[in-house]
Amino acid sequence: MARSRYLLYKAPNNWTENQCKRSRILFDQYPDIKIAFDLVQGLRNIFITATSIETAYTKLAHWYKNVENTGFRAFNTIAYTITLNYRSILNYFINRSTNAAAESFNAQIKAFRSQFRGVKNVEFFLYRLTTIFA
């Protein structure tokens, strides 16, 4: 079981032959782990294969129904988060991009601001930002 932990983080098509054998043994002895693994793979496949908002919305609804049927508390937390934020999650499927660039830029601004221990003159700060990062 200790060596089987890492195969649970990988997609089955990336498993080695040895990991395939371990997974069969693990899933035979612990069927709940197989159910949880299938739920994780189902959510992963939604983000890999869905090409439009409509198909992603439908697949997420089916995945949510599967989570409710299993009764795993950890997945209920994830499902609840998805229901609260489904609009912003579905925006990912418009052009399959995230806001990582904006988050990175915000981190750079925070680091720049902390370097000078606060901002006293906002106009000059914005000028410095545009000259350095533009």
Image (cartoon, rainbow, N blue to C red):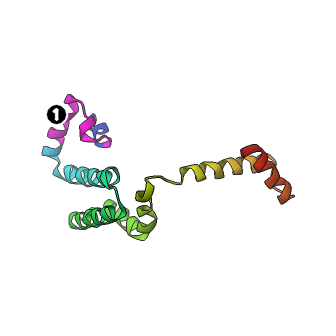
Residue 76 figure quarter: bottom left
Q: x, y (%) of residue 105? A: 64, 49
Relative placement, left or right, of 47 versus 4 is right
| Residue 52 visible in the snapshot | yes
Q: Nearer the viewer, residue 14 or 55?
A: 55
Q: Is residue 43 magenta?
A: no
Rendered position, 20 above or below 99: above
Q: Secondary structure at mark 1?
A: helix
Relative placement, left or right, of 120 versus 93 is right
Relative placement, left or right, of 130 versus 46 is right
Q: Which residue sits at x=22%, y=50%?
A: 33
Residue 52 figure quarter: bottom left
The residue range painted magenta reads 9-26
Residue 118 figure quarter: bottom right
Count all numbered tags in the image, as a single digit: 1
Q: Nearer the viewer, residue 117 or 129?
A: 129
Amino acid type at circle 1 is Lys
| Residue 118 visible in the snapshot | no
Q: x, y (%) of residue 128? A: 81, 49
Q: Which residue sits at x=34%, y=65%?
A: 79
Name the dominant secondary structure of the magenta segment: helix
Q: x, y (%) of residue 83? A: 38, 69
Relative placement, left or right, of 63 versus 87 is left
Q: Which residue is mark 1?
A: 21
Q: Nearer the viewer, residue 73 or 101?
A: 101
Q: Nearer the viewer, residue 104 or 130?
A: 130
Rendered position, 5 above or below 97: above
Q: Is residue 16 magenta?
A: yes
Q: Which residue sits at x=44%, y=62%?
A: 91
Give neighbour class at mark 1: few <14, some 14-19, many 20+ (Cα, 10 Å).
few
The N terminus appears in which quarter of the rendering? top left
